[in-house]
Image: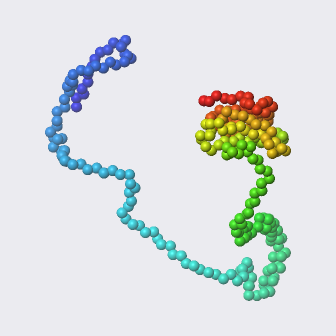
Amino acid sequence: MIDYYYCYSKNKSDIGKKCLFKKSKSQIIGRIEANEELKKKYIYKENIYYNDDNIKKYSEQYVNIESLKLENKFFYHNEGGWTKDVDISEQQNKIKYIKRLDKDINLINSLKILMNETTKILNKNNSINIYEEYFKNDLQNEENFKIKSILVIKDTMRKYQRFITSIKWSTDNTYKLAISYCVNDYQKILHNSPKNCLLYNLNQINNPYQTLYSKTFIKCMRFNHKNSDLLLAGSYDGTVNLWDLRKKNTLCESSSIM
């Protein structure tokens, strides 16, 4: 077979540069003539079928292993532990053999070791009590829970039907209790409904000792864990309010609406 190739020259300075290809007309470099003798050996087929899968292939033959026969057998254990030299039908022979074992030091030492291990296991079982029934005649006894009201704090503005949104205790031992309110009706939220929060002292629970005024309803509040005179609250419109209880009832600081 003839090898076809194309030879060209290139300067040494152009070696290593990028190749710039250009479109050109097709050219016939070489041609291989058909071999008539090989052509006669080929068989033309109109349709070619090919199947492929990923399924495990199993054998089409069945093989049986040897069957194993099982039988149930029983034995009666009457008296054992005797050597072949001892005739168990003779009582005297058994007595002599027992006396001889009682004097054997190796048997005595072996029994001591076995007794120590057995005692440890028995003590563990006795302490754990593996046969104990933990739940005997277990029945679901429904406990009757009772709730007793010790103290009732009433809203001073009950005509607006406000509900409590947050109740917080002060971090110190001054028995301060802060309560915030809100209303259910959306129309009342936008209008002139009272938006104040109340501070109570448990020693004088009849009336609030301080009222905190806000521009919007308060949803949550919390005392400063280091200074209980500072009260931080989150309002309905997303602002954050800060009160200093040592000053007036008005807001000290308030964030802007984002």
Residue 7, horizontal then vertical, whole percent: 27, 19
Question: Can see residue 166?
Answer: no
Q: Kindly identify the residue that appears in the image at 79 percent across and 65 percent down.
A: 127
Left or right: residue 186 versus residue 221 is: left
Residue 202, horizontal then vertical, whole percent: 82, 45
Left or right: residue 81 versus residue 63 is: right
Q: Quadrant of residue 19?
A: top left
Q: Kindly identify the residue that appears in the image at 24 percent across and 20 percent down.
A: 24
Q: Nearer the viewer, residue 29 or 45?
A: 45
Q: How is the image coloured?
A: rainbow
Quarter of the picture holding the N terminus: top left
Residue 224, horizontal then vertical, whole percent: 76, 35
Compared to residue 208, the image places residue 254 above or below, namely above
Q: Kindly identify the residue that appears in the image at 74 percent across and 85 percent down.
A: 88
The residue most toward the bottom is 90
Compared to residue 122, the image places residue 233 above or below, namely above
Left or right: residue 77 versus residue 170 is: left
Residue 22, horizontal then vertical, whole percent: 28, 19
The residue most toward the front is 159
Compared to residue 97, the image places residue 230 above or below, namely above
Q: Kindly identify the residue that appears in the image at 33 percent across and 12 percent down.
A: 11
Q: Quadrant of residue 100?
A: bottom right
Q: Quadrant of residue 222?
A: top right
Quarter of the picture holding the C terminus: top right
Question: Can see residue 28?
Answer: yes
Q: Nearer the viewer, residue 112 or 215?
A: 215
Q: Nearer the viewer, residue 90 or 65?
A: 65
Q: Give the mark count.
A: 0
